[in-house]
């Protein structure tokens, strides 16, 4: 998950893209799943945040980490 520090749920597109890029780097480095971005603001509506979810799934329970 990435979180924008600013108390605003609507970052500019360039900020959002940088956050998504960082999240993709972490997933590519540490995990073996193909990801999708989930930025639905369910329970923390005052900070923009995005989750890396496995494509075709919602949670990452049991996903393999890279060695």
Image: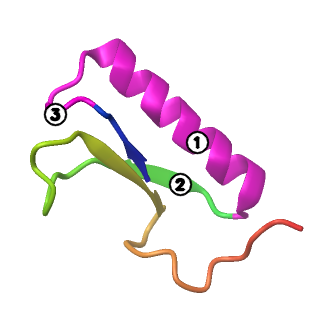
Residue at (73%, 64%) from the top-left corner? 32
Indicate left or right for 65 with 4 as reference. Answer: right
Q: What element carries label 1?
A: helix
Rendered location of residue 7, percent (x, y) = 16, 34
Sequence-wise first label, 3 or 1? 3
Q: Distance between the residues labelled 3 and 2?
A: 26 Å
- The answer to whether residue 52 is above or below residue 14 is below
Q: Which of 10 and 55 is in front in this view?
A: 10
Front tag of 2 and 1: 1
Point out the stretch of residues depicted in magenta: 6-32
Query: How far separated are the C-alphas under marks 2 and 1?
Result: 8 Å
Q: Earlier in the sequence, mark 3 or mark 2?
A: 3
Please give left or right for residue 57 compared with residue 27 in the image: left
Q: Along the horizontal axis of the image, is 26 left or right of 60?
A: right
- Can residue 52 be found in the magenta stretch? no
Residue 14 lies, with reference to residue 24, above or below; the image says above
The residue wearing badge 1 is: 24
Q: Does the magenta stretch include residue 25?
A: yes
Tell me the residue that label 3 is attached to.
7
Mark 3 element type? loop
Image location (x, y in percent) of residue 67: 89, 68
Labelled pair 3, 1 in contact (Cβ < 8 Å)? no
Residues at marks 2 and 1 touching, judged by CB atoms closer than 8 Å: yes
Q: Residues within 10 Å of mark 1 (few under 14, many from 20)?
A: some
For residue 35, which numbered disc appears in the image?
2
Q: Whole-percent x and y of residue 18? A: 47, 23
Type of secondary structure dominating the magenta stretch: helix
């Amino acid at each position: 998950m990435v979180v924008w520090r600013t108390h605003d749920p609507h970052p500019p597109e360039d900020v959002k893209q940088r956050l998504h890029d960082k999240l993709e780097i972490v997933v590519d480095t540490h995990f073996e799943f193909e990801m999708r971005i989930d930025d639905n603001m369910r329970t923390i509506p005052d900070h923009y945040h995005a989750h890396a979810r496995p494509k075709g799934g919602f949670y990452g329970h049991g996903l393999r980490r890279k060695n």
